[in-house]
Amino acid sequence: MIDFRYHIVSLISVFLALAVGIALGAGPLKETIGDTLTGQVEQLRGEKDALRAELDTTSGALQDAETYIDAAGPQLLDGSLADRRVAVIALGEVDESTRTAIDERLEESGASVTAHVTLTETWADPDARTFRQALVGQLLTYLDPVPADDAGVEGELASALVQALVTADPSNPDVLSDDASVLLELLSSSESDSPLVTVADQVTVPADAIVVLGVPFEQPAEGATPTAVPDESVAAQLAVLSAAQELSSGAALADGPRGEGSLTDAVLADQDLAATLTTVSGTEVVTGQVNVPLALAGRIAGTNGHYGFGEEETPLPAAVELPPVDRSPRVPEGTGATAGTEG
């Protein structure tokens, strides 16, 4: 009985409170509540408009800055890579507009692009490991220098690719050596179901230096767990970058945005790699694209650095002046002749 009465009293209290609220809302508090809500809505609308105006101003300033850098690029780059020949290696599929923009900046610096090579999925596919090991057995015959015994398959393939792009005929430095041509053919053979690289155009001229295009990692959706890049794939990419630096006059990584999964972060996480490999992040925008030739020129001159706007990076490479390129033919040892003389 007591419980029943308690419930009756509780229900009556609820209905009374509801009735009082309705009466106040429709009566003396109606205008006050309405005015308060209207004021809050107007305040929020004003804040939204202010934020939109601020965003428009910031976007306009950013666009102006990019336009200025784009226009100043040719003057900043003029002569920085005079007469240098540069091969471009993409570590996978990259945005064509980024590749083209970097090519244009290299040309503005005085360089010529000798090759466009792209690694296929077979380069680091775990299921193709046996195929790569068998191919390395053929490639080693044409390598000079031969990679160290502990280089591993990734290091041996990377050495083969770089030597295929930079090794000149000793008697004619303007053409690839025969061994280099064979290496490139083996790596890109159309007769294979799984070529390791694709080549955009026929490569006939050896490169002096190399730009390595990183593959931008995919930003995970909000709330999603980032997908880890397989260690084997990262090791294979770092092997290419290391071989490019070791076997050419200089190399630079042209990478996308910084973040966990970017190759730049992988380089900076390793003290030894960071001390020898030059990186440029943010090459999807004009600032990074302009930095690539400057960073490459610096690396050829002996200055290693990491360029961008992230942690452990410098915004702009220091200007350097490179000496003229020496393309004098090399006379084979033991011939008794010297360059520039008749036999």
Image (cartoon, rainbow, N blue to C red):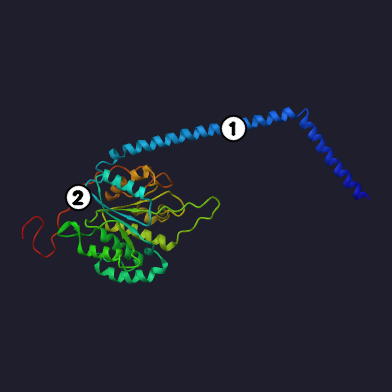
- In the displayed structure, 181 sits above or below 28; it is below
Instruction: Characterize the local packing of mark 1: few (<14), some (14-19) or many (20 or more) Cα atoms within 10 angstroms.
Output: few
Residue 45 numbered tag: 1
> Identity of the amino acid at label 2?
Val
Where is residue 67 shown, x and y percent of the image?
36, 36
Where is residue 19 shown, x and y percent of the image?
82, 36
Give the CA separation, mark 2 to mark 1. Answer: 63 Å
- In the displayed structure, 14 sits above or below 273; it is above
Where is residue 307 shown, x and y percent of the image?
37, 46
Front position in the image: 19 or 43: 19
> Identity of the amino acid at label 1?
Arg
- In the displayed structure, 129 sits above or below 320; it is below
Q: Nearer the viewer, mark 2 or mark 1?
A: 1
Dot 1: element: helix
Q: Is residue 191 left or right of residue 221?
A: left
Name which quarter of the figure residue 339 lies in: bottom left
Residue 16 numbered tag: none
Dot 2: element: loop
Q: For the point 13% across and 60% down, which residue is it?
A: 331
Name which quarter of the figure residue 137 lies in: bottom left
Residue 325 numbered tag: 2
Name which quarter of the figure residue 321 lies in: top left
Query: How many numbered marks, from 0 up?
Result: 2
Q: Residue furthest left?
A: 343
For the C terminus, give its image quadrant. bottom left
